[in-house]
Image (cartoon, rainbow, N blue to C red):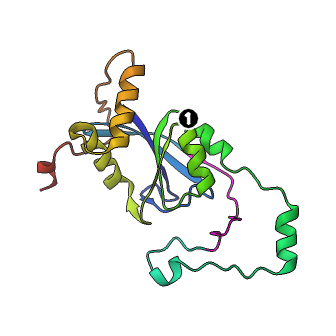
Amino acid sequence: MIKVAFASNDRVNVNLHFGAADTLVVYDVSPGYAELLGVGEFVKVDMKGENRLKALSTDEETANVVDLQLSAEELERLAAKPPEDKVIAKLEFLDGCSAIYAASIGTSSIKRLIAAGIQPIIVGTGQTIEDLLNEVSLALHCGGLSWVERARAKAERTAQAPAAPRETGGGLRLITSIDELE
């Protein structure tokens, strides 16, 4: 029903910064079911912004460390080199997705994702994709997440016929009610 992407290098946990992600995983999510649609692999790039040395960690001491002590040579080298646009290929791959979950997303990428109609969602490092898929499934069935409701309404406007859950064996069975959590 809606396509949702995750920045993950292990295809299990959301653990990558969107701009530097070398892997994006996309699922088609319906109430009670998710099917893997594809995995995008991108050239690994070095982070350049002020957050480039920030660790994607749950350890608070290291998670907020930013080294702003750059040598004059490094500042000159960074200024002389035009920035790489590592986001274009990712935006093209995410075409048709309603949201992207990542451990971190830079401000300019957030603006570009929103302009492309993709909801950027930052979650704690190590959040499992399956838990997040269950959250989306539950919201599709019961409501509660505004971005999911907007995405569902958009999907229903553009769909020819209502999409039924496809249980072809290659997907994940998800929850559709709080009762299933017990």
Query: Vertical placement of 103 versus 142: above or below?
Result: below
Residue assigned mark 1: 95
For label 1, the SS is loop
Left or right of 44 on screen, residue 7: left
The one nearer the camera, 76 or 170, is 76
Quadrant of the image occupied by residue 168? top left
Per the image, is 8 magenta? Answer: no
The stretch in magenta equals 40-53
Quadrant of the image occupied by residue 107? bottom right
Image point (22%, 45%), residue name = 175
Q: Position of residue 88 (x, y in %)?
A: 67, 43
Q: Amino acid at mark 1?
A: Asp
The one nearer the camera, 38 or 17, is 17
Within-10-Å neighbours for mark 1: few <14, some 14–19, many 20+:
few
Left or right of 49 on screen, residue 15: left
Image point (49%, 47%), residue name = 25
Q: Position of residue 166 (x, y in %)?
A: 31, 30
Residue at far top of view: 160
Image point (56%, 50%), residue name = 110
Image point (73%, 50%), residue name = 85
The one nearer the camera, 107 or 77, is 107
Per the image, is 43 magenta? Answer: yes
Quadrant of the image occupied by residue 148? top left
Q: Position of residue 154 (x, y in %)?
A: 40, 28
**Quarter of the image with the N terminus in it:** top left
**Quarter of the image with the C terminus in it:** bottom left
- Magenta region, main secondary structure: loop
